[in-house]
Amino acid sequence: MNISITARKFKAHETLRDFITSEVSKIDKFYDNILDVDVILSYQPNKDTTKTSEIIVKVPGQVLTASEVSDDYKKSTVLAVEKIHRQLEKLKTKNKPY
């Protein structure tokens, strides 16, 4: 599983990158055939500073996406990973033979 992290309009610290890598690597135990994971962090500078974490997971035949907005990148990433986990569980149950 290849994990790439992209930060838009800012430079992500190494501690944030390590946290995101450790969180995203947890989804590998839920689904075996994950090819690539792209994490896109973006920042909206308005009066309420919103931080968005978008996760794009590529599996054979499908692309799963989840996006979360909050006031902290770690919180956004954890919530987006939970969404991806639910999507992978649903995909796994659809692909089971009867």
Image (spheres, rainbow, N blue to C red):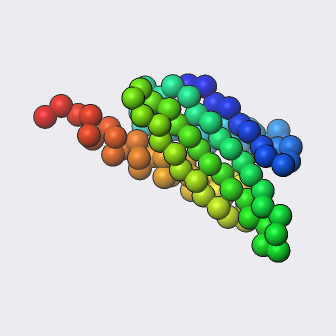
Going 62% across and 36% down the picture, which residue do you hit?
A: 38
- Tell me: residue 7, above or below residue 50: above
Image coords of residue 52 (percent x, y)? 68, 56
Image coords of residue 10 (percent x, y)? 86, 48
- In terms of depth relative to the viewer, which is nearer, 68 or 63? 63
In the image, farthest residue toward the bottom: 47
Image coords of residue 58 (percent x, y)? 50, 32
Kindly indicate the quadrant of the structure image that contains residue 61: top left
Q: How many numbered markers are drawn?
A: 0
- In terms of depth relative to the viewer, which is nearer, 12 or 27? 12
Going 84% across and 49% down the picture, which residue do you hit?
A: 9
- Tell me: residue 52, above or below residue 91: below
Kindly indicate the quadrant of the structure image that contains residue 5: top right
Going 42% across and 34% down the picture, which residue do you hit?
A: 62
Residue 84 shows in this picture:
yes
Image coords of residue 19 (percent x, y)? 70, 43
Question: Quarter holding the N terminus?
Answer: top right
Question: Quarter holding the C terminus?
Answer: top left
Going 66% across and 37% down the picture, which residue do you hit?
A: 21
Left or right placement of residue 57 versus residue 12 in this view: left
Left or right placement of residue 55 versus residue 42 in this view: left
- In terms of depth relative to the viewer, which is nearer, 45 or 14? 45
Residue 32 shows in this picture:
no
